[in-house]
Each structure stands twice: as structure tokens, then as C-alpha cells.
């Protein structure tokens, strides 16, 4: 029997997913009533089959501050999606300290190796503990024995110890969507012991890559007494404090088929044609990122400017379309980053623009799904150069939509996706401006035959390890249960199709 399946053969009746945000979009209609639309991110798509009509439950913050009377709207939304939604109400102060503060001014930069951007405000820690406690209470009120709890991401690292304090001895899983930092960075965290011990209260901890798990193991070995690890491969066993914890590597995927099918639609094909018609007789290089310093946008722009200066035949023959999706705008660092990006775009355009040709087309807004997929489908070169990234789904979505396969992916070696995509992508060090400039030129000159060979490899691997593979692998390793094997309720009703809605980037 494999490590993954030892001792965890309990039968689970229901999956409970807990994440910072509920997978919904909340708006007020003109009459002042709340309207809820289901979200459409990758996680929702992946979880839906395990939750829907199986009594599944999703717990999270609804996205708007305060105690709102959402019960009617949530009930309607629950009926729509086929599983229950339970809100955790957060005040403005809690959102400031827990979400903007601890999660995004401490954990996010530190875990992305950007320690100088951390603001280790002790007040943030207190609010983080308080809000994690609120999640624990909502979970305790809404779950029962036989539920499998799957907690997501860095906002909720303290949920397991909170539940254990309440006497909860069920199996709890946790998945970290962002990287886990190396020891010399993690030790800077003022609450390092509390966080590590908290993580060891889960039964299964999932990481995106073996790099992240290696870092985690290095940290617990150095900071926690009497830790032992056993096994190798996708799932390892950790023995600590009289408990056994599994640590697995599960690179998150995308709903490949849905991306490919939608990219094939007439709507996307039309929109893609229009984009290229507006930028004719040239190769389009595409960057799509949330506004975030971890995504390496300013260095990427500089690398593009360097490529134009070094390789004159790129002039008139390429355009960079850089889409930046607004994000975390309440944090001052993010406002400064926006200004820096916009200044760099104007400098490069000011220096290189010629009659009939602008080097960088800059878009600062969220694209709707058709527009996003049309950009993916039409761009000849995908330029994905984060300084560090848990996975980076944009890289995978770009490949899934590159139907003609006459495209090239340039990918940062520090994106989690690099581990999986290194055989097809051109890998770059995003800090090496000249190296990225050379990679842009290499991609520009690459023959159609080589492009096809590489893109085919990329697409095969993304198709194989898609989002359903990801859920299935995690659940199998955690509780020996496969996707879809949670029992369907007897009063099963066929599912209403989800309404179309732009995907929420975060
Ligand atoms: C975190 C980790 C990890 C982007 N622009 C638009 C748009 N998007 C969507 C993309 C993609 C998502 O946002 C971005 O996902 P990423 O993976 O690239 O990055 P994070 O948001 O930082 O996600 C990351 C991920 O969690 C999952 O585990 O891969 O490493 O940081 O799905 O399609 N969607 C729409 N319009 C846009 O303009 N509709």
C-alpha cells in the first residue's frame, strides 16, 4: 500500500471547501437587493463536480464588508450551483488587518522572496488570528462528522489548530497556492513557530512544486523539535509532535478542455481576428497579469525595450500587448507599482514609436472571457516572467488556447509551472534583462516546425494534468477518495447551467 493511502480509509460523506473568498460575485441591483452570480475561477470549476448534488459546502468571505443579510440571495445561489454557500462576515477593520495586512503585506511578499516589501505590523497578526478564529467558528457550526474539510491558501493557515482546540479530530487537508519560501527567508517571519506548528495540525498539506515542499521540510527540520520524514515521490510522511502528516506535491492545472473549446468558438475567433487586424503584419507578444510586483512586469518591459534596441528587425515586426488586471489597490505598494509600469510603458513607447507602429499596447482593466481568450489565441508569443509564482495559470491557459500551435511560450524559471513546462517553453531568469531580451528574439525567429513541436509538448502535459487531475490526486492522496466518489444525494436534481460571468482573477 502506498504512503498516500495508509490509515486514511475512512468514508467521507461530504466535501467542505474553505477559502478566503466565496466563489461568488455580489452586486446590488437598482432596487437595493443583493444579487449573487457564481464565480468562474479554476478552483470553482474543479470543485463543482465533487460538491454539486452531493451536499457539498463552501465557506468563505462573500467579498463585501459587514453583516449583510445575504441569506435569501445565498440560498438562491446555492440552488443555482448545487451546493451550499456559507458566508463568514468580516468588518472593514478585519479585512484591512487580515486580508490587506497580514495576508498581503506579510505572507505574500515573504513567501515570494520579497522580504523588503514586508510590513511586519504586530496588529496584523492579531487580526489574522481573530479572523482565522471566525472561520473556525463558522466551520464548527456548519459541519458534522463524516465531512472532509479542504482548506485553501495562505489566508487560512491557522484554521486547523483552531478546530483541534475545539476537539475536532477529523481529517483536514490544506493546499498552499503560493510558493513556500526557503529557510533563510522564512525565519524572518516574527510568528514563524506559530505558523509552522499550525500547518502541522493539518493531515495533508499540498504544495504546487517539490521546491515548495523541500523548503517547508527544511523549515520544520530547523525550527521544530523531533521531526522525522519518510518516503519519497509525490507524497511524503512527516512525523512530528506525535502526529503523522502527509506533504504532497500537486501542481494545479486548468480546465483544459473548456479553454480549448471556448478558444475554438466563433465568438473568440472573431475577436482574435479583430485584435490582429488592429496590429497587422507583426507578431503579437502577450503579457497578462494581475497588478502585482511578484509578476515582474517592470523588468519584463525593460527586457522588451532592450530587445528593441538590440535587434532592430523587431521594430515594426512585433508589438507587446500587456494586460494588467487591477488588484489590491488599497495597498500603497500596488499604487506605486502601477505608476512605475505606466512610466516605463511611456518611456519605451516615447523612445521607439514610429509612424504606424507603437511597440507596447497597454491595457489596465479586467478583460471579459471572450477578450482574454481571443488575446491568448491570437498572440504568437506568450511572455510570462514572474519573479516567483506558485504556479501561474496564465501560462497554461495561453497554451491551451494556442490552437494553431504556431506559438512560443517564454516562461520564468521561478514560476511553479516551469517544473512541468520546461521541455516546451523557453525558460528565462526574469532578473536577467538581456537574457529575456534574447529569448524574445529567439521566439520571434523560431521556425514554425520548432514552435509546433514545443507547443504540442506543452499542450499535452497541460491536458494530462488538468484541474480535475489535480483535485483527484489531492483527494486520493489525502483520503483515498476519487473525484466524483462522494455520494450523490437521493433527491438529485439535474443541474442548471451556470450563467456566463467574467472570471475573477483573484
Ligand atoms: C494564485 C497564485 C497560482 C487574468 N487576467 C484576466 C483574468 N485572469 C485570470 C487568469 C488566471 C487568473 O486570473 C490568474 O491566475 P495566476 O495563476 O496566473 O495568478 P494568481 O492570481 O496570482 O493566483 C498562482 C494560482 O493562485 C492558482 O493556484 O497559479 O501562482 O499566485 O486564471 O485567467 N481573467 C479575466 N480577465 C482578465 O483580464 N476574465
Image (cartoon, helix red, strand yellow):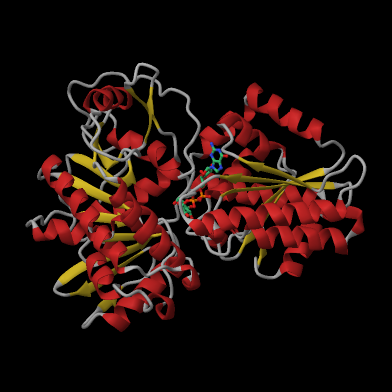
In the image, is residue 191 above or below residue 392?
Answer: below
Labels in figure, total: 0
- Tell me which residue sits at (49%, 73%) in the image: 116
Question: Where is residue 107 drawn, in percent x and y?
Answer: 39, 64
Q: Quadrant of the C terminus?
A: top left
Q: Quick check: 37 above or below 308?
A: above
- Horizontal side of 105 relative to 222 (left or right) equals right
Residue drawn at (13%, 54%) of the image = 170
Image quadrant of residue 1?
Answer: bottom left
Between 199 and 6, the residue placed more toward the observer is 199
Report the front residue among 473 and 502.
Answer: 502
- Confirm whether residue 2 shows in the render: no
Q: Nearer the viewer, residue 322 or 15?
A: 322
x and y percentages locating residue 327 in the rendered image: 50, 47
**Apparent side of residue 398 relative to residue 314 in the rendered image (left or right):** left
Furthest residue to the left?
167
Q: Position of residue 204 (x, y in %)?
A: 27, 60
Say above or below: 484 vs 346: above
Please report the residue visible at 44 percent of the width from the left and 39 percent of the height from the top.
Answer: 41
Q: Which of the 4 image quarters holds residue 30?
A: top left
Q: Position of residue 158 (x, y in %)?
A: 24, 60
Q: Is residue 94 above or below residue 261?
A: below
In this picture, residue 252 sits left or right of residue 396: left
Q: Is residue 303 visible?
A: yes
Amino acid at each position: 500500500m502506498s504512503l498516500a493511502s495508509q490509515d486514511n480509509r475512512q468514508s467521507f460523506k461530504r466535501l467542505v471547501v474553505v477559502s478566503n473568498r466565496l466563489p461568488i460575485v455580489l452586486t446590488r441591483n437598482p432596487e437595493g437587493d443583493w444579487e449573487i452570480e457564481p464565480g468562474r475561477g479554476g478552483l470553482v470549476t474543479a470543485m463543482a463536480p465533487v460538491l454539486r448534488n452531493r451536499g457539498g459546502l463552501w465557506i468563505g468571505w462573500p467579498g463585501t464588508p459587514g453583516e449583510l443579510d445575504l441569506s435569501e440571495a445565498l440560498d438562491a445561489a446555492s440552488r443555482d450551483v448545487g451546493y451550499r454557500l456559507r458566508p463568514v462576515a468580516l468588518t472593514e477593520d478585519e479585512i484591512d488587518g487580515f486580508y490587506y495586512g497580514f495576508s498581503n503585506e506579510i505572507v505574500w511578499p515573504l513567501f515570494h522572496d520579497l522580504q523588503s516589501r514586508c510590513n511586519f505590523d504586530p496588529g496584523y497578526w492579531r487580526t489574522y488570528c481573530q479572523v482565522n478564529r471566525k472561520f473556525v467558528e463558522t466551520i464548527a457550526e456548519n459541519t458534522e462528522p463524516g465531512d472532509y474539510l479542504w482548506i485553501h491558501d495562505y489566508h487560512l493557515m491557522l484554521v486547523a489548530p483552531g478546530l483541534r482546540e475545539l476537539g475536532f479530530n477529523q481529517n483536514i487537508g490544506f493546499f498552499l497556492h503560493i510558493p513556500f519560501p526557503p529557510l533563510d527567508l522564512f525565519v524572518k517571519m516574527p510568528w514563524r513557530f506559530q505558523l509552522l506548528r499550525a500547518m502541522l495540525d493539518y493531515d495533508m498539506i499540498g504544495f504546487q512544486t517539490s521546491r515548495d515542499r523541500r523548503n517547508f521540510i527544511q523549515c520544520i527540520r530547523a525550527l521544530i523539535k523531533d521531526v522525522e520524514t519518510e518516503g519519497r515521490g509525490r507524497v511524503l510522511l512527516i512525523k512530528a509532535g506525535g502526529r503523522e502528516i502527509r506533504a504532497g506535491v500537486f501542481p494545479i492545472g486548468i480546465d483544459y478542455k473548456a479553454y480549448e473549446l471556448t478558444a475554438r468558438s466563433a465568438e473568440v475567433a472573431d475577436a482574435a481576428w479583430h485584435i490582429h487586424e488592429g496590429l497587422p503584419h507583426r507578431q503579437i507578444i502577450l503579457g497578462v497579469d494581475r497588478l502585482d510586483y511578484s509578476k515582474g512586469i517592470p523588468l519584463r518591459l525593460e527586457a522588451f525595450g532592450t530587445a528593441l534596441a538590440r535587434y532592430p528587425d523587431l521594430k515594426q515586426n512585433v508589438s507587446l500587448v500587456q494586460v494588467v488586471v487591477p488588484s489590491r489597490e488599497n495597498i500603497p505598494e500596488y499604487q506605486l507599482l502601477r505608476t512605475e509600469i505606466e512610466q516605463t510603458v511611456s518611456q519605451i513607447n516615447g523612445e521607439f514609436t514610429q509612424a504606424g507602429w507603437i511597440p507596447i499596447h497597454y491595457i489596465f482593466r479586467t478583460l471579459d472571457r471572450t477578450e482574454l481568450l481571443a488575446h491568448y489565441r491570437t498572440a504568437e508569443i506568450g511572455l510570462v516572467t514572474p519573479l516567483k509564482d506558485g504556479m501561474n495559470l496564465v501560462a497554461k491557459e495561453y497554451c491551451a488556447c494556442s490552437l494553431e500551435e504556431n506559438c512560443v511560450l517564454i516562461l520564468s524559471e521561478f514560476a511553479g509551472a516551469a517544473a512541468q513546462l520546461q521541455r516546451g517553453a523557453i525558460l528565462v531568469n526574469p532578473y536577467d534583462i538581456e537574457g529575456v531580451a534574447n529569448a524574445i528574439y529567439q521566439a520571434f525567429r523560431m521556425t514554425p516546425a520548432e514552435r509546433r513541436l514545443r507547443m504540442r509538448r506543452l499542450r499535452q502535459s497541460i491536458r494530462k494534468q488538468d484541474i480535475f487531475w489535480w483535485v483527484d490526486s489531492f483527494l486520493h492522496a489525502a483520503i483515498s477518495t476519487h473525484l466524483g466518489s462522494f455520494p450523490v444525494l437521493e433527491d438529485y436534481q439535474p443541474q442548471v447551467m451556470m450563467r456566463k460571468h467574467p472570471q475573477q482573477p483573484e
